[in-house]
Amino acid sequence: MGSRGRPRGGRDKGRGAEPEPTRPVPEPEPSPEPASASAPASGSAGGGEEETAAPEPGGRAERRRLARRVRRRRRTRRAGELPLLVVVALCIALLLKTFLVQAFFIPSGSMEQTIRIGDRVLVDKLTPWFGAKVERGDVVVFKDPGGWLKGEAAQPDQDPAGIKQIKEALTFIGLLPSADEQDLIKRVVGVGGDTVKCCDARGRVTVNGAPLDEPYVSPGNAPSEIRFEVHVPKGRLFVMGDHRANSADSRYHLDEAFDGTIDENGVVGQAVVIAWPFDHWRRLEQPSTFLTVPDPARTGRRRGRLGRRRGTAFA
């Protein structure tokens, strides 16, 4: 008889139940390895055609090419900016010389021992633009009022061709001091309204009756071997060199107009520092002796000058 209608479990009675087969656990598929740039890609599902992989956009070779291109651009940019930087630097130096600071070469010994022959001094040209007045004791550079130099300017060096033109260009823009400027450097002893006189009973120069103790005068020099008395006109200055025996200053021009005084408008600027040589570097400050000078008395009376001994003019 067939087994139709019989329960399934009854068929296995007596013979024992056979174990139900276990299903195998599927193993995880390995992840596909990235295809190499040079390896061909696997064929497509449809036609089996092979494709070539494109090169990686961030490869080393590409990065090197980009770096070389950037370096070339930077070099080209620097080469183009260099002339502009030179022009800007020269313009700044010219502005500094014209309005701020200028270097001057000292060709004579009229200010020894304070300033020696060959020194380079820096002159402040900015302060007068703000209305500051020259004060007693200041060391100033001023234009030749007329005939004060008399050929005493230093002779320029005989430089070879090319070097001379370069030095002249650097001097023009203020990077080098000029050795043939028609300027003088002296110390201001009296300003407008002052009465400067030499000498008192002890041989000292007096300003408005106050004697001056002058430690800056060159050793071995008297304050003045020329006797004088000058009332300084308004807007003018009475100047003297620190090397009194070797300075053709206001004392040697008493017979000229304004009694040997110079115009304030002819002052180029105040010498503030000796910049070269380094072993002679020093600031040029106002001596304390001028702090005790009283203001001039307003009498309105012009004092005559005494006779003076003629002497040989020095620079």
Image (spheres, helix red, strand yellow):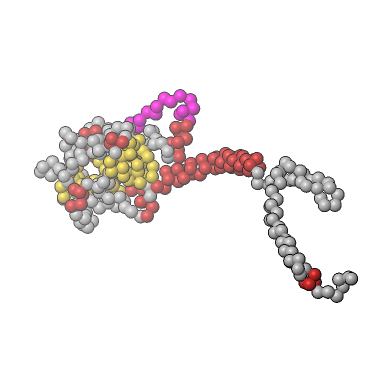
Q: Nearer the viewer, residue 5 or 73?
A: 5
Q: Nearer the viewer, residue 108 or 81?
A: 81
Quarter occupied by the N terminus: bottom right
In the rendered image, residue 156 lying in the magenta stretch gets the answer: yes
Q: Identify which residue is drawn at 85% across, 75% down.
A: 5
Q: Residue 183, position in %: x, y?
A: 35, 38
Q: How many marks?
A: 0
Q: Is residue 200 visible?
A: yes
Look at the image and give the residue range highlighted in magenta.
144-165
Residue 174 occupies quadrant: top left
In the rendered image, residue 9 lying in the magenta stretch gets the answer: no
Q: Identify which residue is drawn at 52% across, 42% down.
A: 85
Residue 282 occupies quadrant: top left
Q: Residue 77, position in %: x, y?
A: 59, 42
Q: Residue reaching furthest left?
A: 201
Task: State left or right for residue 202 relative to residue 216.
Answer: left
